[in-house]
Image (cartoon, rainbow, N blue to C red):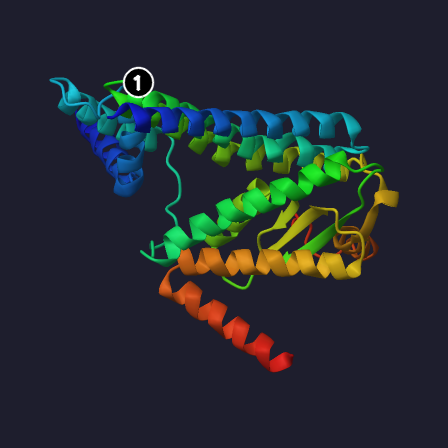
Amino acid sequence: MSDQIVQIMDWAGILCILAGALLSFIAGIGLVRFPDLLSRMHAASKPQVLGLLLVLVGIGFRLLPAEATGIFSLGTLLLVGLFQVVTVPVAGHIVARVGYRTGRIRHDLVSTDELAERLATRRSAPDTSEDTVS
Amino acid sequence: MNALQIKKKIGARALRSRIGKVQIPVALGMTVVWMLLFDAFRLRPETLGIAVLGFGVSVLIMMVFPLPPIVPGFRFWPLRGPYMVLYILGQMFVASLQVSSWVLRPGPPKSSVVAVRMRTESDLIMVCVAIATSIIPGSVIVEASQPERILYVHVLGAQNEEEAVEAKKGIYVLEERIARGIGTRENIAELEAALATERRNT
């Protein structure tokens, strides 16, 4: 590869890594600033996924010209991204569900809550099958 | 002697039913992951051995921990599939900026929990919609009701009824993209029927 292309890729990589770092930083600020569990979940798990993906892309740009065996590193980066994307929703869902069910949310900050209406109607009519919301 | 033969027969039957649980496409996917982990995509003498070993390990895993097959399966549409991926990535970008602006704005943000009823019958599409909504910033799944096919989504920044309805529409669009990207023909037919009734009602 010619020197110029390598340099362009270097810069693209640096920009990606910086943008990813910025997103992760904002996620950190959100974690401190947001008032309750559910909105903190948004800050903690979300801009950070995109941040991580951007950092991975940036690393990819830097590695591609530097290494003769680029496929190995790129494959590893791909796996990191894939597993992150697949596992974050699972963890996020469990934390959100437990937080909601144990009342660790501030209802004054929730404007419409269709799940609360639903749970209330179920509590008043307990003879419907128990595990419809499971 | 006789008891031993019966035992052997039972063992063979159990083994055969376990082998029946192996799903070849899933095993192939696991082999690819194995090969990525062991640097097998560079041509060298060990490549074939790693591939065979990886396939053996994945078959063994699926025999020891059998899982039900994915019903009714999926198919990847060559144009709509990549469009779906790009759409989700684009949404991730836009929504990341939105959530960042919520983080930097003074005062705590309001939010809503909305119920979204899926219009397709497939479990796989429901799972994909749930994963996509979770990855896109600003929304997280609080509850999922599988028999009724309802996802309860917590949306950050939806301050009033209209914005909650707006967020619901976004998730419906996401479902449509995913069903058209990786759904079977039946899923797409269900989706189109639901869309047609919606259009008639409005």
Please identify the residue farthest to the right as the structure is shown: A108
Q: Residue at label 1? A: A66
Please identify the residue farthest to the left as the structure is shown: B45
Residue at 55% in and 48% down = B91
Residue at 19% in and 23% down = B42
Q: Residue B164 in the image: x percent, y percent?
A: 73, 57
Q: Residues within 10 Å of mark 1 (few under 14, many from 20)?
A: few
Q: Residue A133 in the image: x percent, y percent?
A: 66, 49
Residue at 30% in and 18% down = A66
- The quadrant the C terminus of chain A occupies is top right
Please tell me whether mark 1 sits on a helix, a strand or a loop: helix
Q: Is residue B72 visible?
A: no
Viewed as shown, does residue B129 lie left or right of A102? left
Output the chain of dot 1. Answer: A
Identify the amino acid type marked 1: Ala
Determine whether A34 is above or below B194 in the image.
Answer: above
Which sits in the foreground, B98 or A130? B98
Quadrant housing residue B48: top left
Q: Is residue B169 visible?
A: yes
Viewed as shown, does residue B78 lie left or right of B135? left
Which sits in the foreground, A112 or A60? A60
- The quadrant the N terminus of chain A occupies is top left
Quadrant housing residue B110: top right
Determine whether B168 is above or below A86 in the image.
Answer: below
Q: Residue B72 in the image: x percent, y percent?
A: 38, 56
Determine whether B168 is above or below B11 in the image.
Answer: below
Please identify the residue farthest to the front as the structure is shown: A4
Which sits in the foreground, B78 or B63? B78
